[in-house]
Image (spheres, coloured by chain):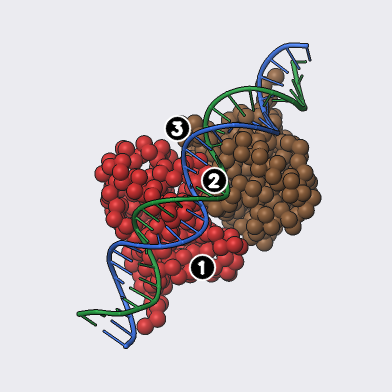
Chain colours: A red, B brown, C blue, D green
DNA sequence: CGTAGCTTTGATTGTTTTCAACACATGTGG
DNA sequence: CCACATGTGTTGAAAACAATCAAAGCTACG
C-alpha cells in the first residue's frame, strides 16, 4: 500500500493551523470558515524521507498534521544543518505561495502525516477574503523570527544553552498548539538530528544532554522530554519568548 | 543640528528598493509608480545608534538609503548576535507592516541615512494596487531565506568559511543593488560587528581574516573588500546563491 | 599631540570535534 | 527462537578550533 492520497475536509491539520494563526491574528467567522474548508490531500511520509527538494517547483503548501518535519540545508561536502523544526499545525512552506520555487528542502524526522494544500485553493481563499492575505503573511513572519532566533542560538550560545533553549521553545510551541504541556512533551528525534539542528556533533549533543540531566532541570529518555524545573531551564537557556511573537 | 526629518520624493532609497523588488517580482507601470511616489521622511543615523528597539510599537517601515544596518539580538548577559545585515535598498523591518510590535532591534553599524515610510502609506499603496501585497510579502520571504542561510553559516561552517560566505553574499547583494562590483565593495564595518554577525570573537575574526588574506583570494584593508579570486572564495565558502532567491 | 577606537599579537585555557569502539534496542530472516 | 544486521545511544582519549586574557600598535580625528 503506497501513500494513498485521499481528499478529506475538516481534518486535524486545518484545526491546528487555524489555532496557530489565531494566536497572532484576529479572524472573522467567514475567514475561519474559509480556512477550515480548504481542500487538500493527506498522506503519510516515512521518517527521513525528503518530500520537498531544493529548487523544486511547488504548486502546493505542506501542512504538518502529525509528526515532526525539518527544513534543512546541505553543504556540498555533506555537512547538514536543520534550520527549522515544524510541529503539527505548522504550514512548513507557506512562503512557496509567493516564491513557488523551493529555496529549501523538507524532510520528515519522524513518521509524519502531511497535508498538501494546492496554492490555488489558498489563492482563492485570499481572493474571497482579502484579510487572509495579511494573516498568512504574518504567519511567514513568525517563522522568519524563529529562524532569526536560531542564528542567535547557534551563534552565541554554548552547547548546554542551545539544547535548553530548543526545549524551552518546543515546549512552548507544543503547549500553544494544544498538543502537550510545556513541561512534558514527546520529541522522538534522534540525537543526530538534534545535532544538525543545534550546530553540534552527535557526540557532543549526547554529553550535553547528560550534563543537562545532571542539573536536575530535565528528565529525558530519548523520545520524551520532561522539564522538572521550567524556571531553571529558562535560566540556563536565557530564554525570552518575545521572538515567538505571541500576542 | 539634530536629525531634521524632511519630506522628499523620488530619493535614491525608493529607486534602490524598487530595483531590489523587481529582481524577484514583475511590476506593472502603475505599481512601479506607486512605489516611487511613497511619502516618507529621511534622516541620518549615527554609527552604533539604535533606532528600533525590541518590543517597540512601529507605525512606519525603515528603508536604508545609505550605510549599513544590523538587526540584532542581545542575550541577558550581554552577548550580542547580529542576525542580518541590511544594505541600501533593503526595507529593514518590512515585517512590521503585519507585526507592528518590533520583535527585533535595529542599529546603524556605520553612519547611515534612513527613510521612514509610514505604514499608512504602504497600506494605501497596497489597497490601490493589490498585486503589491504579494510583492512586499515576497520581499520579506527573501530576508527570511537569508536568515535561514545564516543559521547554516554559523551552525555548520568554520570561521574561515563563515567570513568567505559573508563576503560572497554581500558582494552579490551589492552587485545586485547596483552599488558595486561583487569583487570590490566597501564594507566599513568593525571587526567587532563582524564577530557579532558571524558568531565569533573579535580576536578570532582578526586572525581568520589574516588567514583568508594569506590564501590570496582577497585583499582587505578594514573598510574595503577586494576579491582577487572569486571562484576560490566561492570554493572556500561552499557558496551557493540559490537561497538569495534571485529568479 | 593626545586620545579613543580599532586592529593586531602572544600565551593560555576551554569547548567542541574527531576517531574509534562498545552497548543496547529493534526488527528480520533462517 | 536464535543469529544477525542496523540504527541509535554512550564512552574514552586525543586533536583541532575558538575563546579568553592581556597588552601593544595603528589610525583617524579633534
Q: Same chain for the residues at labels 3 and 2, yes or no?
A: yes
Q: State which quarter of the image contains the N terminus of chain B.
A: top right
Q: CA distance from mark 2 to mark 1?
A: 26 Å
Q: Give the letter of the chain under mark 1.
A: A
Q: Is there a contact, CB below 8 Å, between mark 2 and mark 1?
A: no
Seen at 66% across and 38% down, the residue is B206
Residue B224 seen: yes
Q: Is there a contact, CB below 8 Å, between mark 3 and mark 2?
A: no
Closer to the camera: disc 3 or disc 2? 3
Mark 1 neighbour class, 10 Å CA radius: few under 14, some 14 to 19, many 20 or more: some
Residue A70 lies, in percent from the top left, at 45, 60
Q: What residue sits right under mark 1 in the picture?
A: A52
Q: Give the letter of the chain under mark 3.
A: B
Seen at 29% across and 55% down, the residue is A221
Left or right, B18 with respect to A37, comes to right
The quadrant where residue B238 appears: bottom right
Q: What residue sits right under mark 3 in the picture?
A: B76
In-front residue for pair A81/B201: B201
Residue A148 lies, in percent from the top left, at 52, 46
Amino acid at each position: 500500500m503506497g501513500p494513498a492520497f485521499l481528499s478529506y475536509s475538516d481534518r486535524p491539520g486545518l484545526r491546528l493551523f487555524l489555532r496557530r494563526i489565531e494566536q497572532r491574528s484576529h479572524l472573522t467567522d467567514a475567514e475561519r470558515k474559509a480556512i477550515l474548508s480548504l481542500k487538500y490531500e493527506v498522506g503519510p511520509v516515512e521518517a527521513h524521507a525528503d518530500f520537498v527538494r531544493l529548487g523544486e517547483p511547488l504548486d502546493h503548501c505542506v501542512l504538518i498534521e502529525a509528526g515532526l518535519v525539518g527544513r534543512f540545508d546541505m553543504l556540498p561536502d555533506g555537512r547538514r544543518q536543520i534550520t527549522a523544526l515544524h510541529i503539527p499545525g505548522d504550514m512548513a512552506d507557506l512562503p512557496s505561495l509567493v516564491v513557488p520555487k523551493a529555496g529549501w528542502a523538507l524532510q520528515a524526522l519522524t513518521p509524519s502525516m502531511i497535508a498538501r494544500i494546492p496554492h490555488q485553493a489558498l489563492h482563492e481563499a485570499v481572493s474571497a477574503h482579502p484579510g487572509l492575505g495579511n494573516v498568512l503573511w504574518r504567519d511567514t513572519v513568525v517563522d522568519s523570527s524563529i529562524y532569526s532566533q536560531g542564528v542567535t542560538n547557534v551563534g552565541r550560545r554554548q552547547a548546554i544553552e542551545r539544547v535548553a533553549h530548543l526545549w524551552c521553545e518546543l515546549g512552548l510551541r507544543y503547549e500553544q498548539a494544544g498538543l502537550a504541556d510545556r513541561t512534558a512533551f514527546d520529541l522522538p528525534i534522534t540525537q543526530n538530528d538534534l545535532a544538525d539542528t543545534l550546530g553540534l556533533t552527535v557526540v557532543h549533543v549526547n554529553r550535553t544532554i547528560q550534563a543537562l540531566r545532571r542539573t536536575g532541570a530535565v528528565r529525558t529518555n530519548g523520545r520524551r522530554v520532561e522539564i522538572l524545573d521550567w524556571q531553571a531551564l529558562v535560566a540556563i537557556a536565557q530564554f525570552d519568548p518575545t521572538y515567538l511573537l505571541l500576542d
